[in-house]
Image (tube, rainbow, N blue to C red):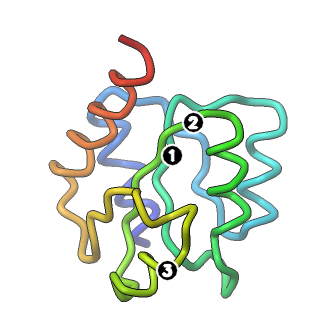
Amino acid sequence: MIALEIQDALTAGGFAVLGPASSVDHALELMEDTTPDAAVLDIDLGGQRVTPVALQLKARSIPFVLASAADPAAIGRNSVLADALNLGKPTDMARLTEAVGAITQRRNP
């Protein structure tokens, strides 16, 4: 349900949304044929860590933010996630929309 709220908020903010993805494999499949401008990730997708998705995003220079209730210390120990902005849960949808706008503008000045 939270993924659908995020999708609705981003769509209302003028973003085209790819997904949501319910698993790591699904997220990677979505990126096979499409290059997103940015991504919103939770640490856990269907019981799996999102690290492979984050690695793929970083390899393709696609910025992302986190929307996760995960322990900040645990996020900090994951080098691929450590520098990402974590908006937490429950996620403030206005702040999320602003954050996605900011990272997409940094990527596409």
Residue at image coords 32%, 57%: 85
Tell me the tag on residue 77.
Answer: 3
Identify residue type, mark 3: Arg
Question: Residue 13: where, in percent of width, then height?
Answer: 27, 33
Residue at image coords 58%, 55%: 20
- Does 77 sit left or right of 73 as displayed? right
Give the position of the N terminus as an image quadrant: bottom left
Residue at image coords 40%, 85%: 70
The CA distance from mark 2 to mark 3 is: 21 Å
Query: Looking at the image, is mark 2 or mark 1 earlier in the sequence?
Result: 1
Circles 2, 1 touching at the beta carbon (< 8 Å)? yes
Identify residue type, mark 2: Ile
Question: Residue 61: where, in percent of width, then height?
Answer: 60, 33
The residue to which callout 2 is attached is: 62
- Does 64 sit left or right of 56 as displayed? left
Question: Within 10 Å of the Cα at label 1, are there few (<14), some (14-19), or many (20+) other Cα atoms?
Answer: some
Tell me the tag on residue 39.
Answer: 1
Identify residue type, mark 1: Ala
Question: Within 10 Å of the Cα at label 3, are there few (<14), some (14-19), or many (20+) other Cα atoms?
Answer: few
Question: Within 10 Å of the Cα at label 2, are there few (<14), some (14-19), or many (20+) other Cα atoms?
Answer: some
